[in-house]
Image (tube, grey):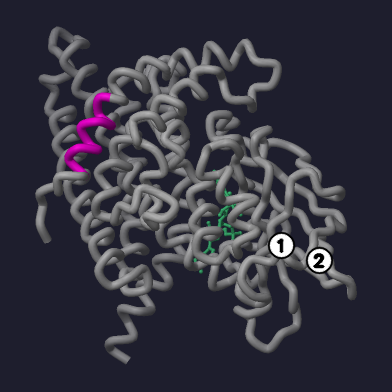
């Protein structure tokens, strides 16, 4: 592996770093102030739209999409250091560069599996940042980390429609008024012999009769407005044409798997940026605060926290870069073990780093005056979202054990 950035990545890095300094960090507080003035807290504050236009003008747009026909055409290895930079301000930077989940995964699904009509109707406005989207898989009634449990029904009505019935929750982005479409995972063949061929994915426009966004779910008390929230959504005999099927009937499970590889690494890349921000805040606080006659930076325990955090971030970054390189060279399937490894290691390690950064800030650490509490909540949820740690550990360990059986 070559550890130097190629010319294109270097150029984009420089541009993105300048964009963060000039536009993103100064807007972090303004976003909250403007949101407080909005009729609905789920709308984009004006500064978000201004930053989107600026990012697009500078070519800092759709950087996540490796397919050059639709996106920036960067490899995972090229995108990794860029996503890390946006992770330093995860509430704002991914959104304004059109690189935020769950739209990124949904755009990938449409680019890879959508037909021409679906691409025209949904992919094009998503790529332009004109609408947003959501991915609806998890259900409150069943253990959804096992996707074979999903109970939502997608039934053919004998005519040209599918009728969808089910309840989903934690559907990210769905509270946002710009969220115009759901990719819904449900069962088309609930009794089929192959439990991984029972599921399909369909596109359900938000304004379809029978679709109700019932409430915003909280995350440690946060509503994640910047993210478009996480909604509970009921599908009560929602009817869509069969042409809204993505790929083939029974292909839902495989599409979900394909969607999750890149999504997981993007989260990990951004988490490293979050950890870098935490280290920076820790150091700034440690040199500027005195307790018992000494700067906090002179306390041995603070040295340990900072040193451990630096070592951990360097380790994580190498593993993430190796995974990105493998995805580029042997494909997402070939990088499966590494994708699981980073999904296990990164959220838990970064949560630990944020925890110590919070401790160093005293009460300020859990307050709204520093980003640490919100970053902590975001990092902690990634031990659940896109599959809980234990599921990845189970699958990684089974592959490891297989060598000895
Ligand atoms: C902030 C946030 C955003 C989310 N966004 C979305 C979204 O946009 N769309 C969407 O569809 N879902 C979303 N989710 C849901 C997320 O993907 C699920 O919560 C996750 O897959 C786990 O499913 P579950 O909540 O049903 O937990 P369950 O399946 O009930 O699992 C509960 C716990 O059981 C344990 N467990 C499960 N399996 C095993 C095992 N094999 N071995 C050992 N222990 C095990 C784990 O500790 C696990 O945490 C989001 C969740 C959060 C918190």
Is 16 a magenta residue? Answer: yes
Q: Position of residue 110 (x, y in %)?
A: 55, 58
* Mark whose residue sits in front, 1 or 2: 1
- Residue extending furthest toward the bottom: 405
Q: Position of residue 350 (x, y in %)?
A: 32, 42
Q: Is residue 182 left or right of residue 7?
A: right
Q: Is residue 188 left or right of residue 365?
A: right
Say whether marks 1 and 2 touch (CB < 8 Å): yes
Nearer to me, 300 or 384: 384
Nearer to me, 47 or 315: 47
Residue indicated by mark 1 = 244
How far is mark 1 from mark 2, CA to CA? 9 Å
Which span of residues is magenta-colored? 9-18
Q: Position of residue 389 (x, y in %)?
A: 43, 59
Q: Residue at x 59, y 56 (%)?
A: 119
Q: Position of residue 344 (x, y in %)?
A: 36, 57
Does the image show residue 246?
Answer: yes
* Label 2 packing within 10 angstroms: few (<14), some (14-19), many (20+): many
Is 310 a magenta residue? Answer: no
Q: Is mark 1 within 8 Å of ligand 1?
A: no
Q: At numbered mark 2, what does the secondary structure look like: helix, strand or loop?
A: strand
């Amino acid at each position: 592996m070559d550890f130097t950035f190629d010319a294109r990545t270097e150029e984009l890095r420089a541009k993105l770093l300048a964009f963060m300094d000039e536009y993103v960090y100064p807007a972090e507080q303004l976003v909250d102030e403007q949101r407080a003035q909005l009729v609905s807290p789920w709308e984009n504050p004006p500064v978000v739209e201004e930053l989107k236009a600026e990012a697009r003008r500078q070519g800092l747009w759709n950087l996540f999409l490796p397919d050059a026909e639709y996106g920036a055409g960067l490899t995972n290895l090229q995108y990794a250091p860029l996503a890390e930079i946006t992770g330093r301000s995860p509430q704002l930077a991914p959104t304004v560069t059109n690189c935020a989940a769950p739209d990124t995964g949904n755009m990938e699904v449409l680019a890879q599996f959508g037909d021409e009509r679906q691409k025209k109707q949904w992919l094009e406005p998503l790529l332009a940042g004109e609408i947003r989207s959501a991915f609806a898989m998890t259900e409150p009634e069943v253990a959804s980390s096992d996707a074979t449990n999903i109970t939502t029904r997608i039934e053919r009505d004998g005519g040209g429609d599918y009728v969808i019935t089910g309840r989903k929750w934690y559907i990210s982005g769905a509270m946002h008024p710009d969220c115009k479409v759901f990719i819904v995972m449900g069962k088309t063949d609930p009794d089929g012999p192959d439990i991984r061929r029972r599921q399909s994915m369909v596109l359900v426009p938000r304004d379809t009769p029978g679709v109700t966004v019932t409430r915003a779910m909280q995350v440690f008390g946060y509503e994640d407005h910047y993210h478009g929230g996480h909604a509970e959504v009921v599908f009560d005999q929602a009817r869509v044409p069969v042409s809204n099927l993505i790929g083939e009937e029974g292909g839902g499970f495989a599409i979900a798997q394909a969607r999750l590889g890149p999504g997981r690494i993007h989260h990990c890349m951004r988490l490293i940026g979050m950890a870098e921000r935490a280290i920076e805040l820790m150091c700034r606080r440690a040199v500027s605060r005195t307790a018992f006659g000494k700067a906090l930076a002179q306390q041995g325990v603070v040295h340990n926290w900072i040193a451990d955090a630096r070592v951990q971030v360097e380790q994580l970054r190498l593993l993430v870069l190796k995974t990105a390189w493998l995805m580029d060279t042997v494909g997402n399937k070939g990088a499966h073990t590494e994708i699981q490894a980073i999904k296990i290691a990164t959220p838990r390690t970064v949560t630990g780093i944020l925890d110590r950064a919070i401790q160093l800030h005293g009460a300020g650490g859990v307050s709204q005056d520093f980003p640490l509490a919100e970053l902590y909540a975001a990092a902690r949820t990634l031990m659940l979202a896109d599959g809980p740690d234990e599921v990845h550990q189970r699958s990684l360990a089974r592959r490891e054990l297989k060598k000895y059986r």
